[in-house]
Image: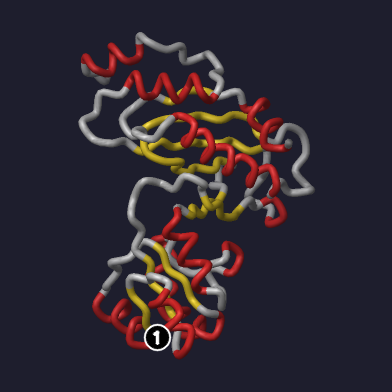
Amino acid sequence: MTQRGKNYRAMSAQFDRTQQYEVPMALELLKKLSFAKFDQTVEVAVNLGVNPRHADQMVRGAVVFPHGLGRSVRVAVFAKGDKAREAEEAGADVVGGEELVNKIKDEGWLEFDKAIATPDMMGLVGRIGRILGPRSLMPNPKVGTVTFDVAKAIAEMKAGRVEFRVDKAGIVHAPIGKLSFDTDKLEGNLMALIETLVRLRPSTAKGIYMKTATLSSTMGPGLRLDAVGLQTAGTV
């Protein structure tokens, strides 16, 4: 049997695992229960009433958080000519074409967090799909990372754009900021995600859409949220 540390035991005694918390209360409680010596990431897990094995119920998309994520994002752009110059001017950390593809393929260079590609570069980028794909770095038109509007895409990435995809269990996991953020900023980011999930609800999904939602920090407990209330607020 696992022996819990004294910090964990003390923290667990301060909240009710069965209670559904309103978002502001849950965020304040996460801050109160924090004992880590670093600025933890706040994350949300939403269990959706969808069957991801059906292609028409795959929930996937991206959201630009109004208050960012509290971290710097290194952006790589696969482009050439005028679009390469546009990407450099927009603040991309690395820009390249075939030479960048070869550097990743031959040297295993992956010193970036997000990747964007113009549509005409996807033939080249496809050569390294097996490298980028498992690391969630492969540009995809469905989430706006294959585009000729590279300046807009870079700005969104730098501002705190997060891509998400429902997993095999029907759950969407996403960070919404740092624990040091003001409560209203974390709530604003969370609601931006919820509104996006509501908008992406598959027409074939029946019954309850947002079944459960849990808020947590890196080292903190999972606090249950009022999922029905969240969905209602995200629909307004």
Left or right relative to 211: residue 123: left
Closest to the observer: 164 or 206?
164
- How is the rendered protein coloured? secondary structure
Disc 1 marks a residue whose amino acid type is: Gly
Residue found farthest to the top? 13
Closest to the observer: 5 or 139?
139
Q: Residues within 10 Å of mark 1 (few under 14, many from 20)?
A: some
Q: In the structure shown, which secondary structural element does the residue marked by tag 1 occupy? A: loop
Looking at the rendering, in which quadrant would you find the N terminus? top left
* Residue located at (26% from left, 20% from top): 2
Q: Is residue 225 above or below residue 150?
A: above
Residue with the mark numbered 1: 97
Q: Is residue 127 above or below residue 112?
A: below
Closest to the observer: 105 or 70?
70
- Return the x and y of residue 57 as percentages of the image width and height: 69, 50
Residue 61 occupies quadrant: bottom right
